[in-house]
Amino acid sequence: MNGKRSEIINQASLLKREGRLHEAIAVCGVLLEEDIFDPEAYSMIGKIYYLLDDYDAASRYFLCALQLEILNASDEREKNESYRKETDELIESSMNPVVAAAGSGSSIKFILLFGHTLIHLAHSLADKSLVHQNKEERDLYKDIISGKTAESNEKYKKIQNEFYFNVGLIFAVAALDMNLRREEVMSAYFSFDSYQLQDLYSESLNVLEKIR
């Protein structure tokens, strides 16, 4: 299946890069038919919906991807001692101000392992408004997730690390239910009220402002 899976991902990525977004979603559906709990498939679909300017759908797919990544990592930590030590070291070495404010016992630390997904999640929440980001950075993000470019700049990286990562982290801690089983993830996050997502995002901005 790994070879077939790689072919499907490459096909979806090509369609996404060419702007054939609805076709790309259909191809990602093949991935989910093979494995309904594939976090990479949910993440890619989230990116495609972002490119379609459907930020609400993108948020839900990124939440599913993040929860599934956490569940997979939890399982791996239980059976793989070297992975557990490696991830513990990554978590403990973090100098993130949000983590410092949360305290040592918080589940927020484990979510740190999935920074890329946190950033994507935050973009899907924030970018319907340009209040927190100018159009140049948003357009660059779109080019990057579409596959049109891999280039960025220092201003872009600073915004990702200081704003998007932290907003995604705070939002995820508030939104995720760490007790969910895999088969409950999709129904949980697709049943969220859109206003509830926006309220959590607004609260996340307030928390980040206080920490800063």
Image (tube, rainbow, N blue to C red):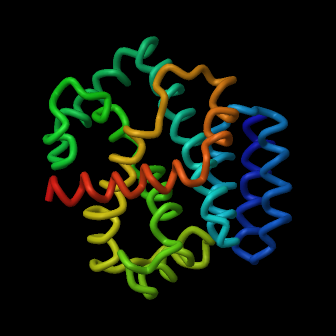
Q: Position of residue 46 (x, y in %)?
A: 63, 56
Q: Quadrant of the N terminus?
A: top right
**Of the pair 140 and 207, the residue shown nearer to us:** 207
Question: How many numbered marks, from 0 up?
Answer: 0
Q: Quadrant for residue 103, please give it.
A: top left
Left/right placement of residue 23 relative to residue 206 reads right
**Of the pair 102 and 48, the residue shown nearer to us:** 102
Q: Residue furthest bottom?
A: 136
Q: Compared with residue 87, is residue 112 higher up or lower down, i.e. above or below?
A: below
Left/right placement of residue 22 relative to residue 84 reads right
Left/right placement of residue 203 relative to residue 39 reads left
Q: Compared with residue 126, is residue 121 higher up or lower down, i.e. above or below?
A: above
At horizontal 51% and vertical 82% (from top left) the residue drawn is 139
At horizontal 43% and vertical 13% (from top left) the residue drawn is 78
Q: Position of residue 58 (x, y in %)?
A: 62, 57
Q: Position of residue 59 (x, y in %)?
A: 57, 54
**Of the pair 120 and 60, the residue shown nearer to us:** 60
Q: Position of residue 68 (x, y in %)?
A: 57, 33
At horizontal 70% and vertical 71% (from top left) the residue drawn is 52
At horizontal 52% and vertical 48% (from top left) the residue drawn is 196
Q: Compared with residue 146, is residue 114 higher up or lower down, i.e. above or below?
A: above
Q: Quadrant of the C terminus?
A: bottom left
